[in-house]
Image (spheres, rainbow, N blue to C red):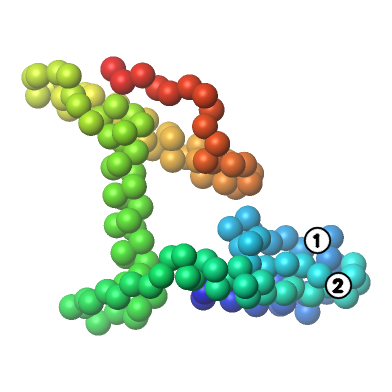
Amino acid sequence: IARVLKSQQDIKAQIIGGKKLSKLKIASDMKPYLKLTGTEDAPAVELCTERLQESIDRHGFNAIASSEDLPAERISEIYDYRDISEKQFSALKSQLGADVTRVHDDQRIEAKLAICFIAAVIRTEIELACRKLELDTNKPCGRRIAPF
């Protein structure tokens, strides 16, 4: 919610700064929740409250206890990093063939895991570039990398 509201405030600041409607841009992850309205010379940004509420209802909420004296935003950010690393590990195993080694000596196991790690880094960079270009990262390409 905070990110959506901050994005809305940032766009409002651009409007106050004199930006025209055609020059305003909503980040792709905010498009479901924000809408540009108005005219070219008098733009406005609206919050799509129904869609935001649907997203909140779908995602629910969580509670995190911490022994550290940190603000809730920072604790949530740290937790998100953990979630990201778990998803990366899952992709490493399921999509990049690291679920089984099929090799037996330590040097080959390390080599295979190193290759899988490098592939995961490259895959992530490609995914981030696609997101930046607002391409669909969930659309399968029709081919799967065969495990080695």
Q: Amino acid at mark 1?
A: Lys
Q: Position of residue 30 (x, y in %)?
A: 61, 63
- Label 2 packing within 10 angstroms: few (<14), some (14-19), many (20+): few
Q: Quadrant of residue 135?
A: top right
Rendered residue at 23%/31% (across/down) = 99
Q: Circle 1 sits in a helix, a strand or a loop, which is it?
A: helix
Left or right: residue 11 versus residue 23 is left
Q: Position of residue 112 (x, y in %)?
A: 23, 24
- Label 1 packing within 10 angstroms: few (<14), some (14-19), many (20+): few
Q: Position of residue 22 (x, y in %)?
A: 84, 60
Rendered residue at 61%/68% (across/down) = 51
In whole angstroms, how far apart are the C-alphas of marks 1 and 2? 13 Å
Q: Nearer the viewer, residue 39 or 128?
A: 39
Using the image, determine if residue 20 lies above or below residue 66: above
Q: Position of residue 67 (x, y in %)?
A: 18, 78
Q: Amino acid at mark 2?
A: Gly
Report if residue 89 is visible in the image.
Answer: yes
Nearer-N-terminus badge (1/2)? 1
Q: Circle 2 sits in a helix, a strand or a loop, which is it?
A: strand
Report if residue 117 is visible in the image.
Answer: no
Rendered residue at 51%/75% (across/down) = 2
Rendered residue at 72%/60% (across/down) = 25
Left or right: residue 75 versus residue 22 is left
Q: Quadrant of residue 34?
A: bottom right
Q: Nearer the viewer, mark 1 or mark 2?
A: 2
Q: Nearer the viewer, residue 110 or 104?
A: 104
Q: How many marks?
A: 2
Residue topped by disc 1 = 23
Q: What label sits on residue 38 in the rendered view?
A: 2
Q: Nearer the viewer, residue 27 or 56?
A: 56
Q: Nearer the viewer, residue 94 or 148?
A: 94
Using the image, determine if residue 28 lies above or below residue 19: above
